[in-house]
Amino acid sequence: MEQAATKVTILVAAHKPYSMPDDSIYRPILVGAAQHANVPNEHWLKDETGRNISQKNAHYNELTALYWAKYNLKDQEVIGLAHYRRFLGRKMSHQYTALLTQSDIEQGLAQTDVLLPKARNYWIETQAKHYLNAHAKRPLEVLSAVITKHYPRYQAAFEQVQASKKAHLFNMSIMRQADFQAYTDFMFGVLELVDDQLDYAQLTGEDQRALGFLGERLMDVWLIANEKRYLEYPLVTLEKTNWLNKGWHFLRRHFSNSQNKKTHF
């Protein structure tokens, strides 16, 4: 008897019309749909249906798609998140042809627990320093206090991540449903407590999106504390990165006390 195919859904978070992969495992989802009058395409999913936090997209970024998946994709065996411009691939590329296929994903998860983008290494500064060079201090302080008080089992892992010069960013991952539920239980449990304590009127610019940025830091905390195995994959980026410009802003944040810093990185 032929074995049934694994049910795999990789959500592709987008906030505007954009070309999408043809592979059916990649499902575009409009994030912040509660604030958008029209969906770009009738076949797109929307993060405002079922149980959701779509109205909080301005603070959670693409994590509103993960929250939607947590409660509305329980029939799927494997859940993942990509961005409309950024995917996991077999090689670095700017083409959809390099994206991970269902077969690639099944082979990866046969060897490990989580599939992730290659870690970014900042070399000259820790993750804590890197965050504070680019963002307001208050959200990270609240995050640290929440973990210490409410999630003490994760405190050592959080401190390890803060002191590390590497991080798995973008809130991107692919994992089995059971791990996905455990990971999102932790992440949204933490972020909801942080959300309750933040005064967004005191945050400007990109820092309005603090919960999305903090969520990026929680992936490695969860992996370490739960001793999860992972494999790293290159990024397929649909738009080319100006690495000279990115490097300039990174060094400027590191060495300058200027308040006029480019936060999004």
Image (cartoon, rainbow, N blue to C red):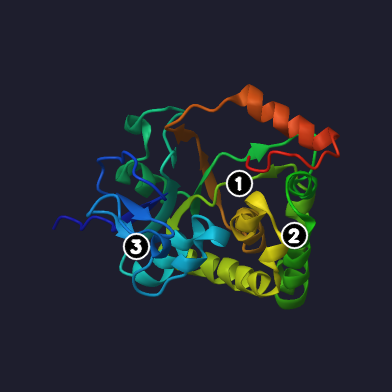
Amino acid carrying mark 1 in the image: His
Relative image position of residue 247 (x, y in whole percent): 69, 27
Instruction: Identify the residue at image location x=31%, y=41%.
Output: 20
Amino acid carrying mark 2 in the image: Leu
Question: Is label 1 or label 2 in front?
Answer: 2
Mark 1 burial class by Cα count in 10 Å: few <14, some 14-19, many 20+: some
Instruction: Identify the residue at image location x=25%, y=40%.
Output: 22
Q: Nearer the viewer, residue 12 or 163?
A: 12
Residue bearing mark 1: 168
Q: Which mark is residue 192?
A: none
Is tag 1's residue or tag 2's residue first in the polypeptide sequence? 2
Residue bearing mark 3: 77
Is tag 3's residue or tag 1's residue first in the polypeptide sequence? 3
Instruction: Identify the residue at image location x=35%, y=49%.
Output: 106
User: Label 3 vs label 2: CA separation?
Assistant: 33 Å
User: Label 1 vs label 2: CA separation?
Assistant: 17 Å
Note whether 233 is above or below 187 in the view shown. above
Residue bearing mark 2: 140
**In what quadrant of the picture does the C terminus appear?**
top right
Residue extending farthest top: 244
Helix, strand or loop at disc 1?
Answer: loop
Helix, strand or loop at disc 3?
Answer: loop
User: Label 3 vs label 1: CA separation?
Assistant: 23 Å
Question: Is label 3 or label 1 in front?
Answer: 1
Mark 3 burial class by Cα count in 10 Å: few <14, some 14-19, many 20+: some
Q: Nearer the viewer, residue 109 or 66?
A: 66
**In what quadrant of the picture does the N terminus appear?**
bottom left
Q: Quadrant of residue 47?
A: bottom left
Is tag 3's residue or tag 2's residue first in the polypeptide sequence? 3
